[in-house]
Amino acid sequence: MVKCVALMSIVMQASVLSGAAILLVSVPLFSLAYRTGRQNYVLQKDAVEVKRRYQYLSAILSDRDHAKERTLFGYSGQITKEYDRLSDYANQKEAAIEKKRYANMKSGSLTMVMLAVIIMLLLLPALSSGKLSNGLYVGLVTSILNLVQGMSWNLSGIMQGVADFNAYLKDVNVFWAMEEKEDAAAEPLKIPGFRVESIEFRKVSFRYPGREEYVLRDCSFVLRGNKCYAVVGRNGAGKSTLTKLLTGLYEEYQGQILINGKDLREYRYGELKWMFSVVFQDFARYALSFRDNILVGNVKEDKEQLLEQVMEKMELGACVQELPWGLDSKLGKLEKDGVDLSGGQWQKLAIARLLYSKAPINILDEPTAALDPKGEAKVYEMFWQVTMEGERSKEEGISKEEAHSMEKFTILITHRLGAARMADEILVLDQGKIVEQGTHKALIGLENGLYKEMFDSQRCWYET
């Protein structure tokens, strides 16, 4: 840039007309370069989106997680064709970007060269008449050629880069303008003396961003802190949405959600993180040691005694004994000597992580869906026994304070009803509303009730 300005000043001193002509031609060329830069950015975004797709297909063709199905179904050839198609498309987009960039610079260069030739011809009469010496003419022509080269290539490239960067900044500004959840990165914040008295939904309606249909509509119910609950319903009834709203993952809902009579939105997000522990259907399987897979449930504590208690409650001792390095054995497939667990063992490990967190409210959102119904019922039976420790402790003479610390307010989300029978109370969700609520015995006695219909259809899963 400095070089071009210096050369331009020399040309203007020697010939104002020549300098003016160069500027007159340069302005539209720079404008064209700027527009080309913006167009190239749009093309690059399109190419990046396609790249993500074929990189995902590349993972399907190479990852170990897909190896069994890749071998069984023999889809590699078909996926490879789609990978090649997307890869070629992305390469064509990138080639088009480079061609347009080169064509723009080249056309600008040719235009400027033609202008330089015209200016040199216009200066010949001054040379012939002696107004310009031979040395000055050569120096002036050299300066013009250098200026033309710098302006046609360097400055044109700079203008395209500026346009590309400005377009990128617009996208960045859109990103930064998005609402940020307050305390999103806050660590769990314990509420001294907290215990669950009640959880209440008051006419809660919710739809996911960008969707027209409501998942929940005027949903109302009350849960008391001294019971274990099961929320059941058909697939798509909105069961998992209850979990997402209750844990504060979504705040754009209508109505009220109250915990101990206090609006959920009035709690700090760090307090909600401490308050809830959840095992989702798609729970995480960490490629860490067996020990760390449990400890990540509460990174602020590393208590060996609590770890042993949790493992005993979930009957994980036998599993650990079979591992080559015991609790320090690496799980998953990242390490060379990593060990993979069975589906049931991973699920017990995820629930152990929940128990280690010591959160006062535990939610199990269909984490055992991959198990057969009897295996699922066995895992839940084990978990219910743990959650009842607080009540049993009261009967055994342990102090009220200690008993409260052992209580586990539990919500089980499921569409399979074998485990729901063990809950103190069952809520039946249908079309975004609670349509039935009561004990298993009460609900099974309702003629034409939805719970009875669902249970009767699944009865054979649990009977031998």
Image (cartoon, rainbow, N blue to C red):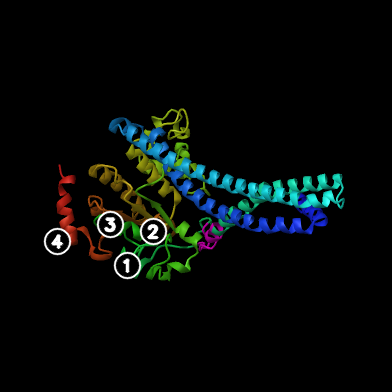
Q: CA distance from mark 3 to mark 4?
A: 25 Å
Where does residue 260 sit, x and y in percent of width and height? 40, 68
How many numbered callouts? 4
Q: CA distance from mark 2 to mark 3?
A: 14 Å
User: Do the numbered discs 2 and 1 sit on residues whose CB atoms are within 8 Å?
Assistant: no
In this rendering, position of residue 277 left or right of residue 3: left
Mark 2 or mark 4: which is in front? 2
Q: Amino acid at mark 2?
A: Lys
**Residue stretch rendered in magenta on the structure:** 171-184
Residue highlighted by disc 2:
244
Q: Amino acid at mark 4?
A: Gly
Residue at x-position 74% and y-position 46% = 145
Mark 2 or mark 3: which is in front? 3
Mark 2 or mark 1: which is in front? 2
> Crowding near pointer 1: few (<14 within 10 Å), some, many (20+)?
some
> Crowding near pointer 4: few (<14 within 10 Å), some, many (20+)?
few
Where does residue 13 sit, x and y in percent of width and height? 83, 56
Residue 229 drawn above or below residue 333 = below
> Crowding near pointer 3: few (<14 within 10 Å), some, many (20+)?
some
Q: Nearer the viewer, residue 124 or 105?
A: 124
Residue highlighted by disc 4:
445
Label whose residue precedes the other's in the sequence (4 or 1) = 1
> Crowding near pointer 2: few (<14 within 10 Å), some, many (20+)?
few
Where does residue 222 sit, x and y in percent of width and height? 32, 67
Residue highlighted by disc 1:
222
Q: CA distance from mark 2 to mark 1?
A: 17 Å
Residue at x-position 23% and y-position 43% = 374
Q: Nearer the viewer, residue 447 or 151?
A: 151
Q: CA distance from mark 2 to mark 4?
A: 31 Å
In this rendering, position of residue 252 left or right of residue 178: left
Residue highlighted by disc 3:
236
